[in-house]
Amino acid sequence: MHAALDNRETPSDAVLCLHNIGKAYGPVQVLSQINVDVRPGEVLALLGENGAGKSTLSSLIAGLIPPEAGGSMSWLGQTYAPSSPGAALDVGIGLIHQEIRLLSQLSIAENIFVGRLPMRRGRVDRDYIEAQAQKQLERLGLKVPASRKVGGLSVAAQQLVEIAKALTLNARLLILDEPTAALGGEETELLFQQVERLKAEGVSFIYISHRLEEIARIADRILVLRDGRQIALHDTAQVPVRELVEQMVGRSLERIFPALQPPKEQVMLQVKGLSCREFALHDIDFSVRAGEVFGIAGVVGAGRTELVRVLAGAARDIKGHMLLDGEVRHLRSPCEAIQAGVVLVPEDRKQQGVVVEHRIEDNIMYGNTDLLDKHGWVFPGRLREFAQTAATRLGVKGAPQQRISSLSGGNQQKVIIAKWLARNPKVFILDEPTRGIDVGARAAIYEVIADLAANGMAVIVVSSDLDEVLGLSHRVMVMSRGRQMGILQRDEATPVSVMEMATA
C-alpha cells in the first residue's frame, strides 16, 4: 500500500524534494528524517495528530523557520533554503494559513498586492492591480469584482482570495492548512473544483486536513506523520480511513461515540417563536430537557451559529420567548446569559474563546471573576487553585501558568469548557466543538459532552460534521436559511433524512 521510506527513488520531475529534514527546539526533537517529494500538478495530503509535526514541516518549506543541519531541500532541481516566507514566495511556494489573514477594510485587489503595491506617477496604480487581481479571480472561478472590499465575502471566497494572492506571485506549490475547517459541504466542493483546475495547470499542493473523509476525494498521495516521524507514504489516496487513523495515533481507534443516558423530564430550555432580524432567523420553536444533547444541523448559511449566538445573548432585536428552567428570560447580552446559566463555546476558539497569549489560569478566570472576587481582589493563590481544579476536572494537559498558545487545539477547547463548567451552567452550548482537533482528541471531547449531559445540563451541539451531530445527539434539529425545517429523533436522524431537510 505504501512505499519504503529510506531508499525511495525520487522522480526526476519532482518540483520539491526533501531529504532527511529535521527540526529540534532545545532537547525536544519535533521533526526527524523526513524524506518526500512533491510532483507537478499533484495534491500530497499531510496527515497526523496535533503535535505530529505537520505545521513544523509546512513552516520549514514556506520559509517561516530554518531546518536543522544535515537535511536538505531542492526546488525545481536547485538547492532550496528559504530565509523568509518572502523568499519562498519569490521562487513560487506559498502557504495559505488556516486562519485567514486578510484586511477586511481593503479591497480584494489591495489585499492581493498589499506590501508590494505598484506606483504610477506617485500614486497606487489601481487599474493595474485590479486588472491583475481580476485575472486570478477568474482563474479561480470567483465571480466578484476585484474592487470589492474583503469584509463582506464568505469564508470560502476569502480563502480563494488568499490563493489568488499567491498566484499573482506565480506560485507553483501551495500549502493549504485546514482549508475546509470553516466550510460546509457545498463550499468544500467548490474549493475542490478550483484545486482540480489549478492541478491541470501544473500547480502542486500540500494539503493538511483533519477531515479524513475528504482526502480520498482531493489527494493523489498521502504522507502520514506521528511524533515528528514519517510513518507512511502512500502512493494512492484510496486508503481505508481506519488504516490512516491507526497510523496517525499508533493504535487501533474507531470513531465510537459515548453512550448517552436518557434525558430527564425537566425542560431546561424552551424557545417559542424566536425571530431575529439582525441574524435572519424566523419562527424557531424547540425545547431541550435536562440531560439531553440537542444537535443542530444544516449547511453553511443555515443560521446555526446565528441561533446559538442569540441564545447566548449576542443579539438585541429579538421576537419570541425563551424560558430557562420554566422562567421567561430576556437575555440581551452575553453577560446576562452567563449570569442566567447559559454559556457558549464559540466556533472560533482563537478569536472568541481564549486569549492565546495569556495563561491557562487567566483564561479560566475570564468569565468567573465574580466567583473569585474577594472585596475587589483576585488573589493569586485562590486563582491558581480555582484554575487547577477546573483544569484537572477536564483533564487539561498543562500547568496553570502555561500559555494557551503552547497547547494543542484539543486542550485549548478543554480550557474553554473548563472555564464554563466551573459555573455549573444550566445550558451548555458548543459550536463546532471539534473543529481543527485531531481524531485522537475528538474522542475526549465527545466524552466531555456526554458527561455534561449526564450531570443534568441541557447541551446544544452545532457541527458541520454530520456524523458528529448524529452520533452525539438525542435529537437533531435541521435548519435551512434561518428557518427550522424539522426535529428528528435519534432513530430517525440519518445522513439522508437530515440532508433532505437541509437542502429543501
Image (cartoon, rainbow, N blue to C red):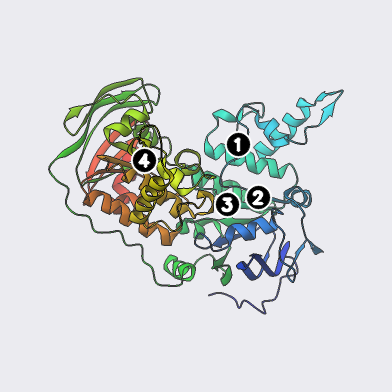
Query: Callout 3: few (<14), some (14-19), or many (20+) C-alpha neighbours within 10 Å?
Result: many
Amino acid beneath label 4: Gly
Q: In this orientation, which residue lies closer to the viewer: 250 or 501?
A: 250
On the image, numbered disc 3 is attached to which residue?
A: 177
Q: Are marks 2 and 3 in contact (CB under 8 Å)?
A: yes
- Gap between marks 4 and 3 measured at Cα: 24 Å
Query: Callout 4: few (<14), some (14-19), or many (20+) C-alpha neighbours within 10 Å?
Result: many
Of circles 4 and 1, the one toward us is: 4
Q: In this orientation, which residue lies closer to the viewer: 493 or 7?
A: 7
Amino acid beneath label 1: Leu
Badge 1 marks a residue whose secondary structure is loop
Q: Is residue 262 left or right of residue 84?
A: left
Residue 69, given in percent of the width and then of the height, sits at 75, 68
Tell me, for residue 142, which label it has, or none: 1
Which badge, 2 or 3, comes first in the chain's sequence?
Answer: 2
Amino acid beneath label 3: Asp
